[in-house]
Amino acid sequence: MDDGTFIDEHGDRRLRDTEMVLPVVVGTCAWWLGKKASDTVTHRWTVYLKAANNEDISHIVQKVTFELHHTFNNPHRVVLQPPYEVTEQGWGEFDINITLSFTPDSREKDVSILHRLKLYENESTPNTTKKPVMSEVYEELVFIEPVEAFYRRMTSTIPRPAPELSCQPYTSQYDEREELDKLKDCRTRVSAMMSDVRKEFEGAR
Ligand code: SLL
């Protein structure tokens, strides 16, 4: 009988025609040091990875590795527990390679995301010590035909909030429901506009 699963070439049972999406956000948050800034230390910054909805994903993620610029001591930073973040001080912007490793039962390959540390807003915005410079990107990690045991473990885990990031108040929360509502709202407005245009056009005939 077909129960919607199959055994892959490694002997793992997987779910056929199933996709699981894990929405995540990677970002940097940088504070200008103002009067305390020196030539080599102008900013204190944090790079982080979190679930888009701020849930704890430590049952899915085994570790997150942040690869910093070679000018930093021990640039290869491994974070095993949430919050997945690294805080440093420095003077320059650079690309940070962020690698996610999943729990071994997932049999998933590591995923790497490149994110640029942003220290400055655009040229017309002066530096301020009042709020940080943020740079966030939303990404969807997709598990295609996931291993059944991993899938069951993931879907039966009771969601709980992740430990707070050091720049939590400045990060955005991306709520899937909210995004869908915004889309619906846009569609309603567009169709109202279309109907107005149609009426105007018919009135002119
Ligand atoms: C730039 N390509 O020239 C970049 C490199 C490197 C930043 C930026 C090190 C601080 C430290 C630091 O901030 N490196 O060594 O403590 O803008």
Image: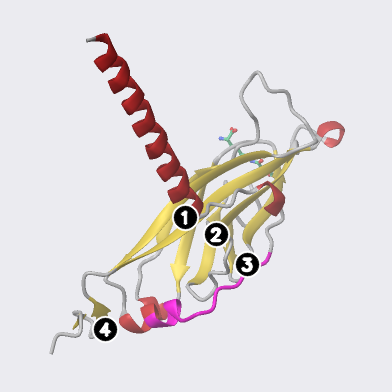
The image shows residue 68, relative to residue 16, as above or below, that is above
Residue with the mark numbered 3: 162
Range of magenta residues: 152-163
Residue type pointed to by label 1:
Glu
Residue closer to the observer: 184 or 50: 184
How many C-alpha atoms fall within 10 Å of the one at disc 2: few (<14), some, or many (≥20)?
some
- Residue 42 figure quarter: top right
Q: Is residue 20 left or right of residue 98?
A: left
Q: Position of residue 54 (x, y in %)?
A: 59, 61
The image shows residue 87, relative to residue 133, as above or below, that is below
Dot label at residue 12: 4
Identify which residue is drawn at 74% across, 28% down: 127
Residue with the mark numbered 1: 176
| Magenta stretch: helix, strand or loop mostly | loop
Contact check, label 1 and label 4, Cβ < 8 Å: no
Q: Position of residue 49 (x, y in %)?
A: 56, 57
Residue type pointed to by label 4:
Asp
Residue type pointed to by label 3:
Ala
Question: Foreground mark, 3 or 4?
Answer: 3
Dot label at residue 53: 2
Contact check, label 2 and label 1, Cβ < 8 Å: yes
How many C-alpha atoms fall within 10 Å of the one at disc 3: few (<14), some, or many (≥20)?
some
